[in-house]
Amino acid sequence: MWIRNAWYVAAWTHEIEPGRINSRTIIDQPLVLYRTADGAIVALEDRCPHRFAPLSMGRLEGDDLRCMYHGLKFAPDGKCLEIPGQKLIPRSACVRRYPLQVVGSWVWVWMGEADKADPAIIPPSLALDDPAWRLQAGQLDYDADYLLIDDNLLDLSHLSFTHEKTLGLDMPQWADERPRTVPLERGLRFQRWLRNHPPRGFMRKLGERVDVWNSYDFLFPGVFLQRTGFYPAGTADRSDGKAPECEPLFHRVDEQAVTPVGRRASRYFYAVGTRAQDIDPGKLERLFDVTTVAFHEDKRIIEAQQKLIDLEPGRAMLPTSLDAGPTQFRKLVDTMAP
Amino acid sequence: MWIRNAWYVAAWTHEIEPGRINSRTIIDQPLVLYRTADGAIVALEDRCPHRFAPLSMGRLEGDDLRCMYHGLKFAPDGKCLEIPGQKLIPRSACVRRYPLQVVGSWVWVWMGEADKADPAIIPPSLALDDPAWRLQAGQLDYDADYLLIDDNLLDLSHLSFTHEKTLGLDMPQWADERPRTVPLERGLRFQRWLRNHPPRGFMRKLGERVDVWNSYDFLFPGVFLQRTGFYPAGTADRSDGKAPECEPLFHRVDEQAVTPVGRRASRYFYAVGTRAQDIDPGKLERLFDVTTVAFHEDKRIIEAQQKLIDLEPGRAMLPTSLDAGPTQFRKLVDTMAP
Amino acid sequence: MWIRNAWYVAAWTHEIEPGRINSRTIIDQPLVLYRTADGAIVALEDRCPHRFAPLSMGRLEGDDLRCMYHGLKFAPDGKCLEIPGQKLIPRSACVRRYPLQVVGSWVWVWMGEADKADPAIIPPSLALDDPAWRLQAGQLDYDADYLLIDDNLLDLSHLSFTHEKTLGLDMPQWADERPRTVPLERGLRFQRWLRNHPPRGFMRKLGERVDVWNSYDFLFPGVFLQRTGFYPAGTADRSDGKAPECEPLFHRVDEQAVTPVGRRASRYFYAVGTRAQDIDPGKLERLFDVTTVAFHEDKRIIEAQQKLIDLEPGRAMLPTSLDAGPTQFRKLVDTMAP
């Protein structure tokens, strides 16, 4: 029931260091990732076909990977090059190679049929070293189904409650009105004005009151690409409730990706930042820290929610007007081929 | 297969402190308990109907409880009072409220159909601050089916073996003869004389030899209400083996309750004490400590027994004359509606 | 699906100390082992037939074992001798006694029908105090099926890879050629010459080059009895590739036994040594340590292999010429009656 024909974020590019072998799991499939001499990243199935030892316990030999149980050697394309003490290498002696793309600072792996892998559909996230932005990255492991984390990101009304003392502090009452929702090919776009908001902390310099334009795309499997622009109060009305056309006073960016590891395990990649001119590194650190605290607030409640769901599987939840985003996205997921 | 139409001990009253939200599980049902301003204790299902976040991670607002995932608010009767950003509150938007009673120092919750909850059938346990008694309370968690703990309490012959160096020391050979057993509506009554016993420790002051009258009721789901009276030697014969009519020299009380948490999880509440005049606080502490050690002796053997039972489910046990109590009680449980 | 009619190593003899009660599990059966006054070792089922408390939590009374839950007492033959407070001892009140043999320093237990237990088929391992040898013993617990450990021992080509920095260092390329394999009644014999090998470390005194004769029997369930003889270079050719007839310069012995504890749990017993004249105790210690490190290398890779196998049960492995031993042995196991 996993959706295989899809791109998944396997790692931050900086996690895959030259000369090191990395083990990752996506939709219950073990992967081994490493860099070849030219810096390209390779993703192979992390299972020697011979006796199923993990190749991630193996040895890099140039661009090749040797299993250190009985010594079979594989090329970066997954082809077996050597079986010790044996001349004949059967054609079936290979490991699966997964299509892989780097976009921004994320390593994307295609988990399904290789000939259907289209790099054009990978969401356009930022590189952490993009000079126009100042960004800081983190990650978090969840003991929960990735779809529960998606639900969370598809309904930001929880900022007012789960994050009342962190992210919710800096923003108007998220739960009071609903964003405009636009369907996308592999997800949804959410947009809203939060009007007449008094900025806090170092953002007080923006003025007494600001209008905040919040816009994010949410794409399968759990990619959250958000821009939050702070504008002089009155901009929302002048824009007639639509997207503003001028540059914001302050521009925050949040990019996140949820990767299903297994049925009850997910990995959450996130980057927080602003335009380069908006913040100094010390303040970015503070912004990152409060965001990390907030993400642990989510993790705590979502992992508890997962346990209560598992206690009575199949029990129906109460629909509310808050759930438009999660409901539409789950319908979209249901239409995707497994 | 749980017996729902029954009262279960959820907590000691002192565990439910004003202003704090408490999470408990009984027969696999998550409960949230808290006190309203008037001091009354409320038990609700610990699961917001909206997305199944635990209400015990919520916030008390006066007498109401707000879910801190998306902000739904509930009254102490379980009715939903608010859904943020939404005017209409559907009638189905409520959490289950469980009938609750305080008797003595135990908080009792009725887990079944509310209209069948009859407070009159709750066993009459002591309050810990009853001036006629001096009592100390504890509790213990078991990784075992509650019925195995019941079995243990329904056959005190094990005192001579499991507790040979603790509780068994202070008493004659429990295993040598069988108590008189009388059926009760929801349990069994056990009574016996233990004759001509030499008291130990601080009880030596009672004389060279005493007769001990031991009597306890054991009631579903695992309530153990025991009185142990120490009398001058000869009282047993003078009483013709029946209950003594005079006051004892020394009167010990043991009140315990076993609560099924899940299939292999139980909570064990216990209070130990004597009449106020029988003991000073320091000696009560010693009595409590040795009792606690003894209960860990039970826990160790019962959890090991549970593992051996689970290794070969369905394997038949060897019946002996020791098992009259456990066998009768299990039959009673089998007749109770699920 | 366990093979019951077989001898299994339960313990080293020195683990079963006089006056102590030992708990072991073999093929998911709980056993209790202890010594009677005459020093003989008894193996009973570790489960009181009354309420399934473990007898290993009981008390030794002379040669008898008393259950410390309700006091039933059992003779070393498993017969029940006492039920407290009850005169009649039913004939069914007994625990199973397992046939037991000590051979060398291993305690062997027969897990199947007692009348089929033939001590003559127990493999002839050394006693640790055999004056002709100097031996050191250890053991290791695996979270893996015993057959995966067997596979490992049935194909020593992995020495060149898994143990490249430990056991593989001291030997030629194990993976380059295949040993001669001879079927035995309950296993396989492997023999090979490793020619023209330069000895390392303290073995340099043997000469510039040696020929190494490696021979081991591998017997159900996982008994590995190996002798490795070091000879002057040229001996292999002079012996025409057969077993050498002269005494070696240096003679190493490795004796190991794998015992299935449960489906994914095994215990690995091992002894390492040489002829008494070949080594001093300090060097034996070093030999033992490097061997122990190597066995942890195996454990790490085999436990990882087990996890990958369990991720996709039933997936076919790639056959190679390395697998002759494992394949033949698995076929033999398949023919053994459950």
Image (tube, coloured by chain):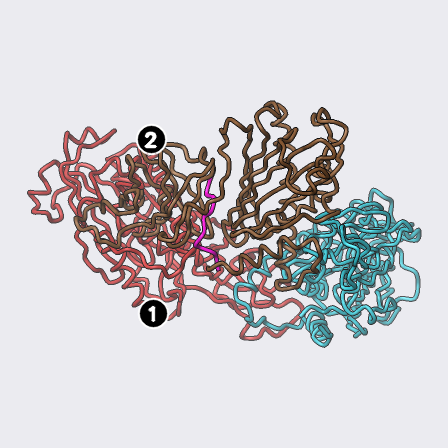
Chain colours: A brown, B cyan, C red
Residue in the image at 48% along x and 62% along y: C44
Residue A5 lies in the magenta-colored region: yes
Task: Identify which amino acid the numbered label 2 is placed on.
Answer: Gly
Residue in the image at 17% along x and 52% along y: C180
Callout 1 crowding tier (Cα within 10 Å): few <14, some 14–19, many ≥20: few
Task: Identify which amino acid the numbered label 1 is placed on.
Answer: Ala
In the rendered structure, which disc, 1 or 2, sits on the residue that comes first in sequence?
Answer: 2
Q: Which one is nearer the viewer's eye here, C210 or B230?
A: C210
- List x then y, in percent, for residue B89: 79, 59
- List x then y, in percent, for residue A121: 45, 47
Magenta-drawn segment: A1-11
Placement of the C terminus of chain C among the 4 image quadrants = bottom left
Compared to residue B179, the image places residue B85 above or below, namely above
- List x then y, in percent, for residue B303: 61, 57
Q: Quadrant of residue C250?
A: top left
Look at mark 1 in the image and give the residue it sits on. Answer: C337
Q: Which one is nearer the viewer's eye here, C39 or B115?
A: B115
Is residue C20 visible to the viewer in this orientation of the structure?
Answer: yes
Label 1 SS = loop
- Left or right for B16, reference A278: right
- Left or right for B146, reference C310: right
Q: Which one is nearer the viewer's eye here, C331 or A323?
A: A323
- Left or right for B183, reference C189: right
Label 2 SS = helix
Callout 2 crowding tier (Cα within 10 Å): few <14, some 14–19, many ≥20: few
What chain does mark 2 sit on? Answer: C
Q: Give the label on residue C282, or none.
A: 2
